[in-house]
């Protein structure tokens, strides 16, 4: 069946984002106890994809959220225990000096910065700084961890959080092929060649 084609008013940048966010307690402080949770696996994804030089996006997502001044669309796939795919995290960013994406800021020229947040990362605190330039076909992996408790005060059970992200800029597109439900997920594999920024700290 021929897919409907959607034409953007101006070229839109497409950014693939893979992520693992793992929250654990003292029992799993040893990396060996949580190693399998932090290993990248192939994604069965319905967030959108690139094939044969064409962009494919879910029809419901693009029709509900697209606006004419949009400049960046993220295809976000999160690795969650017991789930084969997650299809609710795509985002469209309109023109602005910076875009906020979880614990990061992305500037218009696709500079990626850490945006430290004690609630979202925990301690030890990190400075806000430029992590990488997001260039086409040059994936970047970010690893970061932290600890906190439910009230950010002493005397409560410690909670630990480890996060891994991969950002892969896929280029600019003038149009998209719209996928109408029900459609099958595609399998996305993690880029083998990628730059890694490791912000993991030893947590006491």
Image: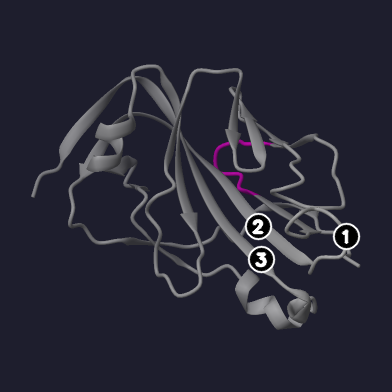
Q: Residue at x 37, y 50 (%)?
A: 47
Q: Residue at x 22, y 41 (%)?
A: 178
N-term-proximal mark, 2 vs 1? 1
> Viewed as shown, does residue 6 lie left or right of 66?
left
Residue 136, quarter of picture: top right
Q: Nearer the viewer, mark 3 or mark 1?
A: 1
Which x, y percent locates residue 77? 47, 55
Magenta span of residues: 133-140
N-term-proximal mark, 3 vs 1? 3
Residue ID for mark 3: 23
Q: How would you rate the neighbour count of disc 2 (Cα within 10 Å): few for under 14, some for 14-19, many for 20 or more?
A: many
Q: CA distance from mark 3 to mark 2?
A: 12 Å
Q: Nearer the viewer, mark 2 or mark 1?
A: 1
Which x, y percent locates residue 123? 84, 53
Q: Nearer the viewer, mark 3 or mark 2?
A: 3
Secondary structure of the residue carrying numbered label 2? strand
Residue ID for mark 1: 154
Label ID, residue 164 = 2
């Amino acid at each position: 069946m021929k897919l409907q084609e959607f034409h953007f008013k101006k070229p839109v940048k497409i950014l693939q984002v893979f992520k693992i966010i793992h929250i654990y307690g003292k029992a799993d402080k040893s990396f060996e106890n949580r190693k399998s949770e932090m290993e990248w696996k192939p994604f069965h994804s319905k967030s959108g994809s690139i094939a044969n030089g064409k962009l494919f996006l879910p029809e419901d997502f693009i029709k509900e959220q697209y606006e004419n001044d949009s400049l960046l669309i993220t295809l976000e796939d999160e690795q969650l225990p017991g789930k084969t795919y997650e299809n609710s995290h795509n985002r469209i960013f309109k023109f602005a000096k910076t875009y906020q994406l979880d614990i990061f800021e992305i500037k218009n020229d696709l500079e990626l910065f850490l945006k430290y947040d004690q609630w979202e990362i925990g301690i030890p605190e990190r400075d806000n700084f430029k992590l990488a330039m997001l260039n086409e076909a040059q994936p970047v992996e970010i690893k970061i961890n932290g600890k906190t408790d439910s009230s950010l005060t002493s005397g409560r059970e410690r909670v630990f959080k480890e996060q891994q992200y991969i950002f892969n800029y896929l280029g600019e597109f003038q149009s998209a092929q719209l996928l109408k439900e029900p459609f099958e997920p595609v399998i996305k594999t993690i880029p083998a060649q990628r730059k890694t920024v490791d912000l993991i700290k030893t947590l006491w």
